[in-house]
Image: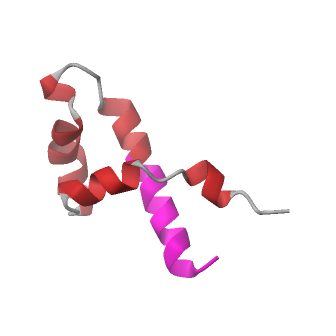
């Protein structure tokens, strides 16, 4: 696995943890946009669309070694 891809998986895992901690379905003040605006943007400085793309990555499946 390439070094760049491992870094992407680590970042995706961190962002997914933040989203799980702060996102609530049906509440506008706890939407993915609000999570990005208040928790992700100040620390990671990535675009909202990039944040959504990282949320879709299957980290657990990608880190498993094929046998």
The x, y position of residue 61, in whole percent, is 64, 52
Q: How many marks?
A: 0
Q: Which residues are magenta?
A: 1-15
The x, y position of residue 17, in whole percent, is 43, 42
Q: How is the image coloured?
A: secondary structure
Q: Is residue 6 magenta?
A: yes
Above-or-below relation of 64 to 25: below
Identify the residue shown where x is 36% and y is 41%: 18
The N terminus lies in which quarter of the figure? bottom right
Q: Quadrant of residue 54?
A: bottom left
Identify the residue shown where x is 55% and y is 53%: 59
Q: Is residue 4 left or right of residue 30?
A: right
Which residue lies most toward the right here? 67
Q: Is residue 57 left or right of residue 37?
A: right
Identify the residue shown where x is 37% and y is 32%: 21
Above-or-below relation of 65 to 15: below
Q: Is residue 55 magenta?
A: no
Task: Specify the principal SS of the magenta part.
Answer: helix
Q: Is residue 16 left or right of residue 32?
A: right
The x, y position of residue 49, in whole percent, is 22, 56
Identify the residue shown where x is 76% and y is 62%: 65
Tell which of 44 and 61 is nearer to you: 61
The C terminus lies in which quarter of the figure? bottom right
């Amino acid at each position: 696995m390439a070094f760049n891809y491992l870094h992407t998986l680590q970042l995706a895992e961190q962002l997914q943890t933040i989203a799980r901690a702060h996102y609530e379905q049906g509440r506008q003040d706890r939407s993915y946009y609000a999570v990005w605006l208040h928790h992700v943007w100040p620390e990671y400085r990535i675009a909202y669309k990039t944040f959504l793309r990282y949320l879709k990555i299957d980290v657990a499946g990608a880190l498993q070694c094929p046998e």
